[in-house]
Amino acid sequence: MRLRCAVPVNMPHAKSITRSFPTMTFPAALRAYRYRVDDELEQYLQEEISSVRDKDVMVADALDHVRTALLAGGKRLRGACMYYAYRAAGGNDEQEAIAASVSIELLHAFLLIHDDIIDRDDYRHGQPTLHAMYGKMAKKKFQDADAEHFGMSLAISLGDMVAALAQKRLFLSRFPAERIVAALRRLQVVISETTIGQIKDVRMGVEAKSATEEEVLKMYEQKTARYTLEGPLHLGATLAGAEDSIFRSLSAYALPVGIAYQIHDDILGIFGESQTTGKPVGSDLEEGKVTILISHAYRHANRTQRSRMDAILRAPLKDEQLEEMRMIFRSTGALDHARETRDAFLERGRLAAVKIPSGESQSQDFFSGLVSYLAHRSV
């Protein structure tokens, strides 16, 4: 069965996303981009799955699961940022820009596969995560095997393969060779920065009480802002042959907006709805993640509240404990502080958006629309 995102019947079938953008809301423009890039994703991955199947059926099946999970959900925000930065920097090969943006979506899939292992998440967007699915399979099929280790080993290996496919897609693009090489170099920077942020996240998880807000925000910058926004924007601008001034303006925009994006994720992770977010509400608490909410609450909680936080964090979470943590976040001012900090970063991003040098009005609309969208999103 072919998978793609649903597109309203009155949405123009996009030979040009940008021509339809001025009459669209930001979410509609994002859906229009997703509609096109999902076709590219499906075609590219199907070709790779067919190629692998002759070599190893299990690997092909696992890669097919990645394809299904990837096409089942996700906003395609990173790919859209790459595409619109390409347009903003003067790029005019729209179809090739869409095709090349598959690379950042696959990089995102690779990082999520590994992140799901670290976070011990069994589901994403309603689909079983790779390590959980193959761990369960091993438990039934290989009775003498360490099923959990088998599932994690297979997922780590498939994640590495998806990372290679992300880079291969850039290799295959039809841009000038020097721009492809420059884009691949930037992709390595994205991976390195994200890894540093991920390691900080893991380390702070075992020392939640001592993590400062400055450390949390720096981790957000490295783990989220640089790969969710700055990296994709820089990749698009690189493929367009942008001047250095554009990269500086994109960074000035991307970093505060990316940090705000993560803060909002923290809030949704506690106060959102799992049916909407696609992940269990409160999973950050079970995983012992240090968020801006946790950092602020520890600094402003009384002795009783700190004791309760110590007892709840990293333990199986029941509804009453989740509600107790929500009350602590409210009473210590952590929720209000997180919202205020998010809004301050979004305002910095809004002011930076209008300074991105571009004569392409649709891209400017996209950058400004993204700020408004992030301020109110529920997923």
Image (spheres, rainbow, N blue to C red):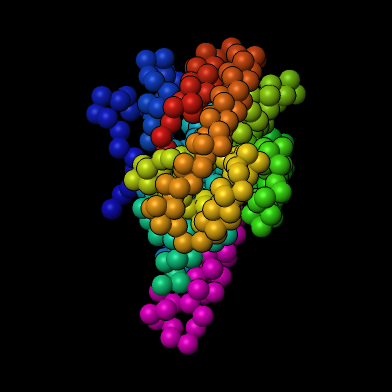
Q: Which residues are the magenta region?
A: 137-166
Is residue 255 at all visible to an observer of this figure? yes
From this view, report whether residue 173 is shown above or below residue 344. Answer: below
* Residue found at x 57% / y 65%: 157
- Asked if residue 211 lies left or right of residue 313, the reply is right
Most foreground residue, 269 or 359:
269
From this view, report whether residue 320 is shown above or below residue 183. Answer: below
Q: Residue furthest bottom?
A: 144
Q: Position of residue 377 (x, y in %)?
A: 43, 31
Q: Quadrant of residue 333?
A: top right
The quarter of the picture where the C terminus appears is top left
Q: Position of residue 127 (x, y in %)?
A: 38, 56
Most foreground residue, 241 or 30:
30
Q: Is residue 19 magenta?
A: no
Q: Is residue 162 magenta?
A: yes
Q: Residue furthest right?
A: 244
Is residue 17 at all visible to an observer of this figure? no
* Residue found at x 45% / y 47%: 324
* Residue found at x 61% / y 25%: 345
**Number of numbered discs:** 0
Q: Main secondary structure of the magenta part?
A: helix
Q: Position of residue 195 (x, y in %)?
A: 68, 51
* Residue found at x 70% / y 46%: 211
Most foreground residue, 134 or 12:
134
Q: Position of residue 261 (x, y in %)?
A: 55, 34
